[in-house]
């Protein structure tokens, strides 16, 4: 188990993606690629802001029909470590400004694996009630689906 993982507060998914780490990283850091896999299909994602630096804004929108988009994530990047880690939170917005409300800080790590890339996504919550709510909202299904869509996006076609 990841020593940074607190089972009382955190939820996590781990997946081996059969693609080089650079391909996974690029799918995460290129807005046009990111939009292709970030939300569970058939929903659609639009990136409004993706400043990949600590304090940079991160804002996405979501749509059921491709016509009307609504808020999805409004937050800020806390860490962007090339090819290794991306940390974002909805507790802050661009420029380290406090957000109106906060729910999660996400830590995404990528590491070399004999079969490609080990992809780990951890959702950290401020209390057990938020963790439980996120789990009941479908964390494992939603984040698992998104990880599968990322894998499908980057894995070579055979």
Image (tube, rainbow, N blue to C red):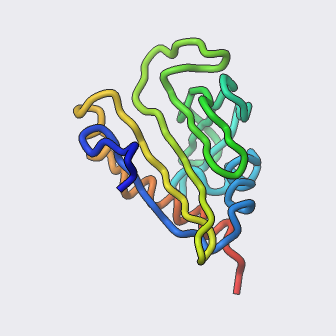
Q: Quadrant of the N terminus?
A: bottom left
Question: x%, y% of residue 146?
Answer: 52, 57
Tell me which residue sits at (60%, 56%) in the image. 110
Question: x%, y% of residue 78?
Answer: 60, 29
Quarter of the image for residue 126 reads top left
Q: Is residue 97 left or right of residue 143?
A: right
Tell me which residue sits at (74%, 54%) in the image. 26
Q: Is residue 145 above or below residue 116?
A: above
Q: Is residue 50 left or right of residue 108?
A: right
Q: Is residue 108 left or right of residue 13?
A: right
Question: x%, y% of residue 120?
Answer: 50, 55
Tell me which residue sits at (39%, 52%) in the image. 2
Outermost residue toward the bottom in this view? 158
Q: Quadrant of the C terminus?
A: bottom right
Q: Is residue 21 left or right of residue 43?
A: right
Quarter of the image for residue 113 reads bottom right
Tell me which residue sits at (72%, 46%) in the image. 82
Question: x%, y% of residue 6?
Answer: 31, 42
């Amino acid at each position: 188990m990841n020593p940074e993982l607190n089972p009382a507060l955190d939820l996590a998914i781990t997946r081996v993606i059969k693609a080089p780490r650079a391909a996974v990283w690029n799918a995460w850091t290129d807005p046009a690629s990111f939009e292709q896999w970030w939300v569970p299909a058939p929903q659609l994602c639009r990136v409004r802001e993706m400043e990949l630096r600590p304090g940079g804004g991160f804002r996405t929108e979501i749509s059921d029909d491709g016509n009307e988009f609504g808020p999805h994530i409004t937050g800020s990047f806390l860490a962007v470590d090339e090819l290794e880690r991306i940390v974002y939170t909805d507790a802050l917005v661009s420029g380290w400004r406090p957000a109106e409300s906060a729910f999660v800080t996400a830590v995404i790590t990528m590491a070399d694996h004999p079969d490609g890339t080990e992809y780990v996504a951890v959702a950290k919550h401020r209390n057990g009630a938020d963790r439980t709510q996120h789990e009941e909202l479908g964390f494992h299904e939603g984040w698992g689906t998104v990880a599968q869509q990322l894998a499908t996006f980057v894995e070579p076609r055979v």
